Image (tube, grey):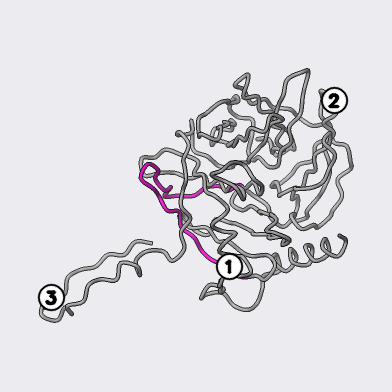
Amino acid sequence: MTFSCSPAENSEEIAPVQPNIETETPQNTLPIIWESKPAAAPIIDIAIGKSESGAFYTTAILEDGSAQTFDMDGIPVARSKPDLFAEISSSKPISVSGTDLIAHIAKSQDDLLSLALVSPENKIVGFSALNTSPTIDTLCEAKSDQPMDKMQINYESDDAIFKAAIDLSTDTPVLAAAQTPNISETDIICGPTQTLSTSAQSLERKALAISKQSQSTLLVTDIQNGSRQTYSLKEGMSVNAPQALSSVATYPDFISIDYPQGLLVVAGEHNDGSSKLSYISMETLLDDFSDDADTPQEEDATNTISPEIKALQDALKAVSEEN
């Protein structure tokens, strides 16, 4: 938010008080650790993937329908042809014909389920169609304990959430289960502008829903108690904050010394018109929302918890009771 002031017509009426700079600065900020090189086109969706060697990559879907993959240094390492993809979601490392790949669930330009197959070694992102693929509206978060040769898929179609699985055990991935309506702890989180980070703090399971609130702010909600806070991105000496956010993605576990409790990646457009990825440690958010921290709900928030958050709370409770 930007403020502007005009001098009073009668200068004698100005009180001799220094301006309070802190009131003009957003209360909550997330420091950007690093940023990527500019993407080849505006970014509309992102997802984080891990290779079998333990390397992490972020793959972005661009406005021209291509996919572009960046390594943890923010360097572009692979790209697909245009006019293939519309969205991207969860991933698993796989091997196809002896080549190590990262398979991401994707939505094609014609609204069908597909896979984006990232090969940093060959510097390409391939496209794989799925058999009997249903038409979908948007992809949803899908974190599950599927075997290594299967990947869970959640998606929204005609205002209903569906769950299925992809069989990755052959060179031609196929849908391994018929799609069935099912609401789970992650199915409410759908679309490029929101994500869910479920991580362990000591013996506590912390689930934070992170979503784009405005052009330049994120809304973070603690699923357990419904508390929420708004954050802006804080630029550093060598990195700039994006002015128009477009997509968010998280990885909840240890990545490196810089990201010991996980990674938040935010895509957005900068003042110079370029689109980049901003890399942020999840440690700041987890500390803010720890049980020991004083994190009241936002001033404009009411005591009424939204139906989406209530559904997530019920799902997490059910999972805890099962365990």
Crowd class of label 1 (few under 14; some 14 to 19; many from 20; radius 10 Å): many
Disc 2, disc 1: CB below 8 Å?
A: no
The range drawn in magenta is: 227-249
How far apart marks 3 and 1 lie (CA) works out to 41 Å
Q: Quick check: can you spot residue 131?
A: no
Task: Name the N-terminal-most of marks 3 and 1.
Answer: 3
Q: Nearer the viewer, residue 123 or 45?
A: 123
Q: Position of residue 205 (x, y in %)?
A: 72, 60
User: Disc 2 designates what residue?
Assistant: 170
- Please give the name of the residue rendered at 68% of the width and 42% of the height, measured from the top-left corner: 89
Query: Where 297 sits versus 223, above or below?
Result: below
Q: Which mark is residue 228?
A: 1
- Please give the name of the residue rendered at 62% of the width and 35% of the height, measured from the top-left corner: 56
Q: Position of residue 290 (x, y in %)?
A: 62, 65
How far apart marks 3 and 2 lie (CA) works out to 76 Å
Q: Nearer the viewer, residue 138 or 312?
A: 312
Q: Which mark is residue 9?
A: 3
Query: Where 322 sits versus 271, above or below?
Result: below
The kind of residue on which mark 1 rests is: Arg
For this view, does 280 lie left or right of residue 114?
A: left
Q: Position of residue 156 (x, y in %)?
A: 74, 50
Query: Where 123 sits versus 87, above or below?
Result: above
Q: Quadrant of the N terminus?
A: bottom left
Crowd class of label 2 (few under 14; some 14 to 19; many from 20; radius 10 Å): few
Task: Name the N-terminal-most of marks 2 and 1.
Answer: 2
